[in-house]
Image (tube, rainbow, N blue to C red):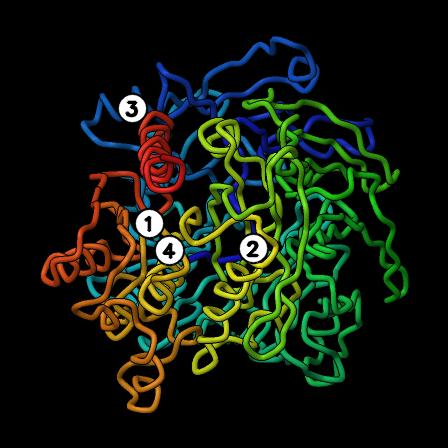
Amino acid sequence: MSWRRTRATPRCWPRRGRSSPPRTASRRRSSGRGGIDNLWQDAEHPHGLWRHTSEASYRTAAPAWETLVDVDALARAEGKRWFLKGAVCLKPAETTCLVRLSNGGGDAVELREFDTRSKRFVDGGFRFAEGKQYVQWLDRDTLAVAREWTPGEVTASGYPYVAKLVGRDGSAREVFRGQKADMSAAASVLRGAGSRVDGVLITRNVTFYEREFSLLGEKGLIPVPLARKAEEEAYVDGQVVFSLQEAWGGFQPGALIAYDLAALKADPKSAKPKLIFQPGPRQAVQQVSSTDGKLVVVLLEDVKGAVDVYDVQAGRWTARRLPLPKDANINLVDTAGSDDELFVTVESFLTPTSLWLADADAGTAAQVKALPARFDASTHVVEQFWATSSDGAKIPYFVVRPKAAKLDGSLPTLMYGYGGFQVAKPPIYMPEAGKLWMERGGAYVIANIRGGGEFGPAWHQSVLREKRQLAFDDFAAVARDLAARKITSARRLGIYGRSNGGVLTTVSMTQHPELWNAVVVESPLIDMLRYHKLSAGASWVGEYGDPDVPGDRAFIAKYSGYQALKPGVEYPLAYITTNTRDDRVHPGHARKYAAMLQKLGVPYLYYEQTFGGHANDADPELNARRWARHYVYLAQRLMD
């Protein structure tokens, strides 16, 4: 399951949030060192080096890096399987950080204070034991923290619901307490000019999609008038930016709106939000952030990326588009807090990921670095088609196929889908698919089925709960459209999905075993009648429904892949894989599905990695082996 609509960025790219370099003397507000950070992984350092260099050095062919944390050495010294899950650093200098360490790659992390100048963990500094927790700095001696304060003080989903302000002197003042039935709670710090703290925003996540927001005032909490289905996005120039996932206050779903923070504090009942941007029917907001004085919005338009930057003057927002490549996926990597620069990555199916530095004030963008090509892309072409689903909806999908392929239904094709949690699946560069699949003559398909975020909230919400079957119908419709175009056929078609995609692939396997000859089921959610009892499953009731409610259980039971397995049916040989340390989607789903196949006498393949967490990609060597297993299986099923 994904928390947001974004995908992870490549591990070799930098971030600027810790120590942005100066642009001019007037823009430089920080006393920090300036420069570029990244996490570097190679054969000698599979868990990574957190490194730092100057911007000037980074622009050269061979940057001079200094190591801040050697994660592999730390793991060896402490006898743990540490993975770095990022760092939360105090602005503006960003030399004092809280490092997030995961033992085994799961979502739960240990937090430790770290000084980037001395390159050492701070003796007697802030430290919090392993858990699913959220933290932000107020000042050098104060943190806003939501975590499990006493044993069992978490929601049914396993997330914190109590937020406190924690002092370096050991004090801990509770500022918010949600309910155990909630999904989670967190506090975010609103920083203005010069990294001044302008306020603290409390978010009560009632469900995965429903929230209540409050400002922390001197006399208690100040409720923010807002739709229940809304998300905090950014804070810039005294404006708190939210996105709406439902119609509210005259605004339509998908809208970006802004409240003036001073007006909210003075009188929240009379404060009026202003519209920043309303996406069109073929657009969707993917990421929102802020630089020193600009709002940055990453969009999808017909499932292709673009970036707009906004100014606000007297409550009126104006935008201009950054000059970035078209027909590509664009991902925001980091924004500067002391100027208006930002890093984005640009990629497509056949073009390696490149790093661009943009200036939101000047409206310029230029490529800084590019990863090398990992496969021969000259043999393939990208096409976008639309299939017709069971209710007449038009479903877009991308096909990456050999230019010289005969369209006679014989092309080995791997089809990927997700279709949930408003997570879009735009074109991305996939070295493993290119080298192990496309170079060997295979085609790759991404089906942009409903449930994702390709076209905003409506695209997602059209298949929630009792309407979920439509997402599965979309996937089957794409398969049939591929066959109708004679791109491939059932004998040569395989499908792959992970996490929520595990629901998709197992339902597809049980409802339409005749449509495919290979099924990869990775880190899957499968037993939908018990998913809410395992790991973070209770947080997803808003997506699927509640199996403890008879009406919900009835429509969930109709598709749940585990319960749908029947004796006497000829199913395609499935490859099922999971991770022992997955603390988001419990490995029990995969184990149970394999056990049921075994009970029915249905052949299958099963592999369980013992560490790495839900993402399964923390260790590059293990990740390479993971993809090798996938594509050996797919080649055997679809190419041999």
Which residue corresponds to mark 1?
Answer: 522
Disc 3 packing (10 Å; few <14; some 14–19; many ≥20):
some
Which residue corresponds to mark 4?
Answer: 499
- Residue 593 image position (x, y, % from top left): 20, 60
User: Which is closer to the viewer, label 1 or label 2?
Assistant: 2
Q: CA distance from mark 2 to mark 4?
A: 24 Å
Q: How many numbered markers are drawn?
A: 4
The answer to whether mark 1 and mark 4 are in CB contact below 8 A is: yes
Q: Amino acid at mark 3?
A: Leu
Q: Quadrant of residue 586?
A: bottom left
Mark seen at residue 233: none
What is the secondary structure assignment of the residue under circle 1?
A: strand
User: Which is closer to the viewer, label 2 or label 3?
Assistant: 2
Q: Is residue 147 visible?
A: yes
Mark closer to the chain start, 1 or 2: 2
Which residue corresponds to mark 2?
Answer: 482
Q: CA distance from mark 1 to mark 3?
A: 30 Å
- Residue 568 image position (x, y, % from top left): 18, 67
